[in-house]
């Protein structure tokens, strides 16, 4: 138990250090930024992180019984379930200094409570929940900085070094397996509960995500102008967004350039394509004569192995924790290596980079598993079922503590600000 609390304390502190690193240089107009649907004002988001931690770790007794906040009006400012998104720029937010002070006071009390009550199972659960919530917002801060062309918070842009392409398909035998998290998996989110039997037919999956070079061929072949390649909602989105290439690409004298934060660099051909919407991924698949994997296929490829019936791996490579030679998680800036990198992270079926580098769109809408029941943080999953698509695997900005083979991310199919790419599967016979 005491080892668990020590690990939890380290997780909480690590999450906070990431938050502070991502916002430390923001001041003036950058603390609010423009009013956009896909971002939050950073000043509000920092306060929300502190509010969430205080709400669950210090104030929550039951849904009807909350202790007072250290900041008297915190609920009216930072409760994302009740404070409309469009109003967050005009709220009477505390100064950045006062907001950071609020975070520090909350953190101090949470750590003290963990030290005093290491056997409090509910406290440990909510401390982990709030730390993972903060890790998610750290990733969102990175998206915001990219969206708004703020400088890289890490002092770097695209990673150096080349590993090259990783072409071809892996033949995956399929079979029956238990999709989702098992009760002995430790902390899991409600949308991962619980493991249930799924039958996966044999399929062939790309050994690597689609690369910039592969996607550029689609663009240059008129993929964005060919109506036949797009679904009806996808075409409406493309027209309304005036999309003719990935959002951060531009052509300069016949050379594709890609923006990472506030810097444009020549497109690296063997990096996984990133910042593409589900609609774009779907259209590419039609052009290539391929398809997106189902969520079940993705998890099967990432967590099973031939000759290991009934066993699931926590990660594609096994049960050992993520390491730098296996997965690119919480790397620097917009850094993503070539798709051939991280060979030690291959799945048992030979698929590379299923964890880290870029999130991967799947074919499926985000839906609950059989018997779903919301956890205390009821707004986490249930409001989004049915109109979001599932992504798997994490990206270079994802905390290694957060992601594994059953973790489910979800965004609406139009979103291309997130660090999302995709891999493809062969069409079924």
Image: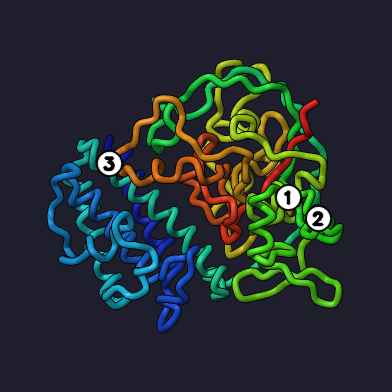
Question: Looking at this view, is 324 or 134 the one in front?
Answer: 134
Kind of element beneath mark 2: loop
Question: Does residue 341 show up?
Answer: no
Please state which of the two labelled residues, at mark 3 or mark 2, is closer to the viewer.
2
Q: Quadrant of residue 239?
A: bottom right
Above/below status of 219 relative to 427: below
Evaluate if marks 1 and 2 touch, with contact meaning CB atoms under 8 Å apart.
yes
Mark pair 3, 2: CA separation: 53 Å
User: Nearer the N terminus, badge 3 or badge 2?
Assistant: 3
Q: Residue at x 33, y 57 (%)?
A: 80
Residue 24 point in image, percent of width and height: 42, 73
Task: Name the residue carrying label 1.
Answer: 230
Please state if 71 lies on the left or on the right of 84 as rendered: left
Residue 70 point in image, percent of width and height: 16, 63
Q: Residue at x 57, y 74 (%)?
A: 149
Q: Quadrant of the N terminus?
A: top left
Residue 136 point in image, percent of width and height: 44, 53
Kind of element beneath mark 3: helix
User: Nearer the N terminus, badge 1 or badge 3?
Assistant: 3
Please state if 179 lies on the left or on the right of 235 as rendered: left
Q: Quadrant of the C terminus?
A: top right
Kind of element beneath mark 1: loop
Q: Quadrant of residue 213?
A: bottom right
Within 10 angstroms of label 2, few (less than 14), some, or many (20 or more) residues? few
Above/below status of 375 relative to 34: above
Total numbered labels placed on residues in the image: 3
Residue 362 point in image, percent of width and height: 62, 41
Task: Name the residue carrying label 2.
Answer: 226
Q: Residue at x 40, y 45 (%)?
A: 383
Q: Residue at x 23, y 53 (%)?
A: 55
Above/below status of 363 relative to 81: above
Task: Name the residue carrying label 3.
Answer: 124
């Amino acid at each position: 138990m005491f080892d668990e609390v020590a690990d939890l304390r380290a997780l909480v502190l690590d999450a906070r250090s990431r938050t502070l690193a991502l916002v430390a240089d923001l001041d003036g107009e950058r603390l609010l930024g423009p009013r956009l649907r896909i971002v939050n004002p950073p000043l509000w988001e920092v306060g929300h992180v502190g509010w969430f931690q205080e709400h669950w770790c210090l104030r929550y007794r039951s849904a009807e019984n909350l202790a007072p906040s250290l900041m008297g009006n915190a609920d009216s400012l930072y409760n994302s379930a009740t404070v409309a998104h469009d109003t967050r720029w005009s709220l009477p937010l505390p100064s950045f200094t006062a907001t950071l002070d609020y975070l520090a006071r909350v953190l101090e009390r949470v750590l003290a409570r963990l030290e005093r009550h290491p056997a409090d199972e509910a406290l440990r659960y909510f401390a982990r929940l709030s730390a993972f919530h903060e890790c998610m917002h750290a990733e969102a801060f990175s998206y915001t900085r990219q969206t708004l062309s703020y400088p890289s918070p890490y002092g770097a842009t695209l990673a150096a070094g080349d590993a090259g392409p990783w072409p071809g398909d892996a033949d995956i035998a399929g079979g029956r397996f238990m999709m989702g998290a098992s009760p002995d998996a430790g902390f899991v989110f409600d949308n991962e509960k619980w493991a249930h039997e799924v039958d996966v037919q044999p399929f062939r999956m790309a050994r690597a995500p689609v690369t910039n070079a592969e996607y550029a061929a689609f663009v240059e072949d008129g993929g964005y102008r060919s109506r036949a390649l797009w679904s009806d909602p996808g075409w409406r989105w493309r027209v309304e967004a005036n999309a003719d290439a990935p959002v951060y690409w531009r052509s300069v004298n016949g050379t594709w350039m890609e923006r990472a934060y506030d810097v444009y660099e020549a497109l690296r051909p063997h990096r996984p394509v990133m910042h593409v919407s589900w609609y774009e991924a779907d259209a590419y698949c039609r052009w290539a004569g391929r398809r997106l994997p189902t969520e079940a296929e993705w998890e099967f490829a990432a967590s099973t192995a031939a000759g290991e019936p009934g066993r699931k791996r926590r990660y594609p490579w096994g049960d050992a924790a993520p390491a730098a030679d296996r997965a690119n998680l919480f790397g620097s800036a917009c850094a993503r290596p070539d798709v051939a990198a991280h060979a030690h992270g291959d799945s048992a079926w030979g698929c590379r980079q299923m964890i880290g580098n870029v999130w991967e769109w799947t074919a499926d809408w985000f839906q609950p598993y059989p018997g779903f029941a919301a956890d205390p943080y009821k707004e986490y999953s249930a409001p989004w079922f049915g109109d979001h698509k599932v992504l798997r695997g994490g990206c270079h900005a994802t905390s290694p503590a957060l992601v594994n083979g059953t973790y489910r991310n979800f965004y609406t199919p139009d979103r291309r600000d997130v660090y999302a790419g995709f891999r493809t599967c062969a069409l079924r016979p």
